Image: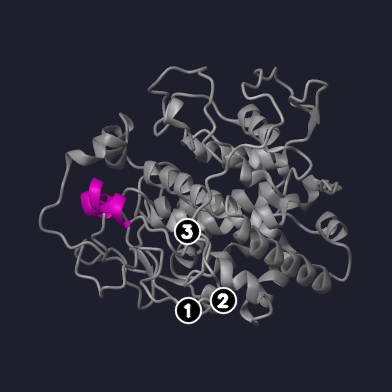
Amino acid sequence: MARHRPRRHHRAQRQPDRRHQQLGHPEQVERAIIDQYDDMSVSMADGLGENLGAIYAEARLAGELPKIDALLAKSGGLVGYYSSSNPSKNYFDYDRPYIRFPELLQYRDKEGGDAWNSTSGAYPSGHTSQAYWQGTSLSMMLPELAPQILARTSEAGNNRIVMAAHYPLDVMSGRMMGQHIVERRMSDPAFRELFAEAETELRGVLEAGCGAALSDCIAADTPYLSDEDALALYEQRMSYEFPQIAPAGDAVTIPENAESLLITSHPDLTPEQRRQVLELTAIDSGYPLDEGTEGSWQRLNLAAAMAAQVEVNADGTISLVDAGAEQPEPTTPGTNEPTVTPAPTVQPTPTPTPTVAPTDPEATATAAPTASATTAPVPATTPPAAGGDTAGDGSDALATTGAQHVGTGILAAIALLVTGATALVLRKRTAKANS
């Protein structure tokens, strides 16, 4: 049965203060530091709304969501456990902003933090990849809140730029990687059963904590952002308004099995119809990292696709309801089930016990979520030497540009990247340790 997004009354009066969205604002710096060190599947709880987010975070910290923890935890979460950004980092081996331009950046960190220590490559962002496999999974379990959850996920990715640990292209590629990871899992029927159990657990805990039907709880809550603002922010961060370096207006090629990401938001549609929804909501062609006919994860606007209201035409094709602008004709009509190429099925346990290194190459592993989200940043006026030795845990570094947009020096480096991801191989470090 399709789920309908609850109507939010007096939405404009419910908007929280958004000053923290500014890159240099102290509140945003603090949020970026929290996302750096904490389990983002918990620190991004405010994407669920003020009340539901608090219920969710408290339940996670109290151990009341063991199935969610088994799938989404930073340390050992099954969704992203067998993925890593290390091979790509080692291949492209491009210096992070705080290594290339330390003199242009203002150093910030929490007390006892290890900012600017990591010497691993910048591309792609492992933190962003983790945020997106966690946030995309949460949005699929709560499709009524998908725009807000994914907008908050995009903030977690954007926080890597706030901290000067990554460039926008690193964050864009991290989004693509994180959502591809979820697709690999959702293409596995055995994993979908585990996912459904975790979804049932989550929705039950939220309703019990709220004391009403979930639709009523959502309608009465203060959202992270309005639907309109969330969708706009998410789309802006898909391309960071880079110039289009390839032709615009090309038809989109949907990656194989990407339609599995719409299983919960559009359960009544066939796989081919879900692919049409992805086509109709995709962004334009030609932006950096658009892979064109190879299947473009860069162009998939999952927030818009999950939020889309659709109708099925007489011939089985899909149209968007109240979409506004004229929509392109879908290129994949039909109702036949596609052949799914599943990822290897993993026999899980309720609480996975990792036997290899944690998935996220940039985050320090923790045995369980902690309540450290209240830790305030401690400004430091003298930065340590950029790229110093790490403790071997692969933790990322922290810094901030302190400006709404990337500084002039960083833009110079980005200009080297805009010509495409292959430009990243031009600069290899020969003596730095990878972490």
Circle 3 Cα neighbour tier, 10 Å, few/some/many (<14 / 14–19 / ≥20): many
Q: Quadrant of residue 425?
A: top left
- Return the x and y of residue 38 as percentages of the image width and height: 49, 70
Residue located beneath label 1 in the image: 353
For this rendering, which residue is in front, 23 or 294? 294
**SS class, disc 3:** helix
Q: Quadrant of residue 61?
A: bottom right
Residue located beneath label 2 in the image: 349
- Return the x and y of residue 316 as percentages of the image width and height: 77, 25
Give the vertical position of 239 relative to 248 (above or below): below
Residue 130's disc number: 3
The residue type indicated by label 1 comes to: Thr
What's drawn in magenta, residue-wise?
A: 86-104
Q: Label 1 near label 3: C-beta < 8 Å?
A: no
For this rendering, which residue is in front, 117 or 194? 194
Which one is earlier in the sequence, the residue at label 3 or at label 1?
Answer: 3
